[in-house]
Amino acid sequence: MNITILGCHSASPHEHKNPTAQLLDIKGHRLLIDCGEGTQVQLRKAKASFVHIKHIFISHLHGDHFYGLPGLISSFRLLGREAPLHVYGPKGIKDAITLLLKLANSWTNFPLHFHELSSKKSALIFEDEHVQVHTIPLIHRVYTNGFLFVEKAGNRRINKEAIKKYTIDKSQFRLLQLGKDVVDNEGKTILNKLLTLNPHQPKKYAYCSDTAYNPAMIPLIKGVDLLYHESTFLQQHEQLATQTQHSTAQQAAKIARDAEVGKLILGHYSSRYKDLSIFKDEAQQFFPNIVLASDGLQIS
Amino acid sequence: MNITILGCHSASPHEHKNPTAQLLDIKGHRLLIDCGEGTQVQLRKAKASFVHIKHIFISHLHGDHFYGLPGLISSFRLLGREAPLHVYGPKGIKDAITLLLKLANSWTNFPLHFHELSSKKSALIFEDEHVQVHTIPLIHRVYTNGFLFVEKAGNRRINKEAIKKYTIDKSQFRLLQLGKDVVDNEGKTILNKLLTLNPHQPKKYAYCSDTAYNPAMIPLIKGVDLLYHESTFLQQHEQLATQTQHSTAQQAAKIARDAEVGKLILGHYSSRYKDLSIFKDEAQQFFPNIVLASDGLQIS
């Protein structure tokens, strides 16, 4: 699982401060999370192939999370995309995009599917053989969801050292990966557990932006490997955070601590702050393992 | 009259290729022409004060001329704007912006006036003491207007050398600027023409993008000082220009020649071309005085 932070700043875009977007790579799936203005330029900078993005998840319909989507969809069309595109987001997103395409008299030449969300309870919204995506209801000024990405367990892994001791034909490797015992070249059955290792531990990533401090999300994100939690404000502006339904760095850290996550990424910084290192300093009073998001940052 | 090219590339935005937007400064008026994705970042780079933009003119509702507008309007709100904003553009623009603001649950806290255009004939759409703005009907895949900006004649100018010969009190300078005769300190009437120079010649700027080759615009832009005419394609792709209702550099130059304009700016380049100097070379076969638009270019 690889995450590229395409933008991690709140509100208006600036030259080196892009609004929210992230690209998540899970076993060859490219999932885009939010799409602020300029996201397509950020994707180009990250040298990410547009055509491999098949699923886009929009948390809420504030401009800094969404106003890059009409342009990205137009660019998909200009690039001759044929693969279907699935967009998950709050009710209303279909009307907005459809109206803009209609006014431009340029409907897409690829299937464009909208999955509109309106439930205030966590729901499984996408699943295939590699990944599950669940919503995480958040508290903000408009209807907002975070997203929980859960990798599925992979195959058993061939133990390269162990297998040297036997005469196993390569045609049998697929059976080994699927957990089956196999027969060696002398006709003798070899137990799977002698030849394979457990699958890699599947990873979980929770994305929570934008939200007021919301302990109700803790059971949903308990024990995830990685949590992105917005931290628009520093402690001195806690009241402003409450008022605008955003979080402080310390509130994000408390959620990370109480949900016992592996690592916390902070982001969605207000443009009023010049020195972002204070976000980390303040948050580390409650949770040690913190990464400050920055535009272009890649996390494996 | 000063023009800042904020973006001059067609279709999808790239890192150093911004879609169309221009900032026009006429006697303290700041007029924004088109607003592709990323325009607000380009305005910041140009160090242009957002709050002085009171009039926005949108040629047509293709994304590369319009998808920066919702974000710019949101930023005006975040910056605490109070001054009214007037947006001129094709019918439908009000519905689109209104829907996006409604979905974000964030109506502007300043008066936002839409002036929707649907006439296929040239019309005067804005006038005050300094400037007139007329539409220039263009031929494109959707309803599109260019815009003709006509400065009004200024005041007569005090002749600093001539006035030294008389004893004229400074309180009378305003009368001189308005063309009146004045009385000197000895009670003698002095004719205005002895003390003043003619006003600066008022300038005309015509903006024509996007459009197929369209000689019908020539009477409307006859003799303008400066013409921006799109040139999406080079000569080798003339057929593609016809098909997509765009122009080649040579077609733009023919319009400039036949309209007897002072200077031609080329722009709206297709991203397929690496060497933009060929646009100038091809166009100069028909019209000599050519400037290639580039993002950030300022023209006085």
Image (cartoon, coloured by chain):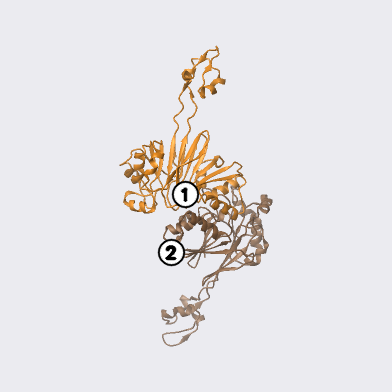
Chain colours: A brown, B orange
Give percent across and percent down for residue A247.
Answer: 64, 55
Residue B280: image quadrant is: top left
**Amino acid type at image mark 2:** Glu
Q: Identify the residue at horizontal 45%, vertical 25% (top origin).
A: B198
Residue B202 vertical position relative to residue A153 in the rendered view, above or below: above
In terms of secondary structure, where does tag 2 sit?
loop
Q: Nearer the viewer, mark 2 or mark 1?
A: 1
Are marks 2 and 1 in one subunit?
no
Give percent across and percent down for residue B203.
Answer: 44, 34
User: Dot 1, crowdedness within 10 Å: few (<14), some or many (≥20)?
Assistant: many
Q: Residue furthest left?
A: B285
In the rendered image, which residue does mark 1 sit on? B60
Near-viewer residue (A140 or A201):
A140
In the rendered image, which residue does mark 2 sit on? A82
Residue B158 vertical position relative to residue A175 in the rendered view, above or below: above
**Amino acid type at image mark 1:** His
Give percent across and percent down for residue B177.
Answer: 51, 24
Give percent across and percent down for residue B28.
Answer: 52, 35
The answer to whether any part of residue A244 appears in the image is yes
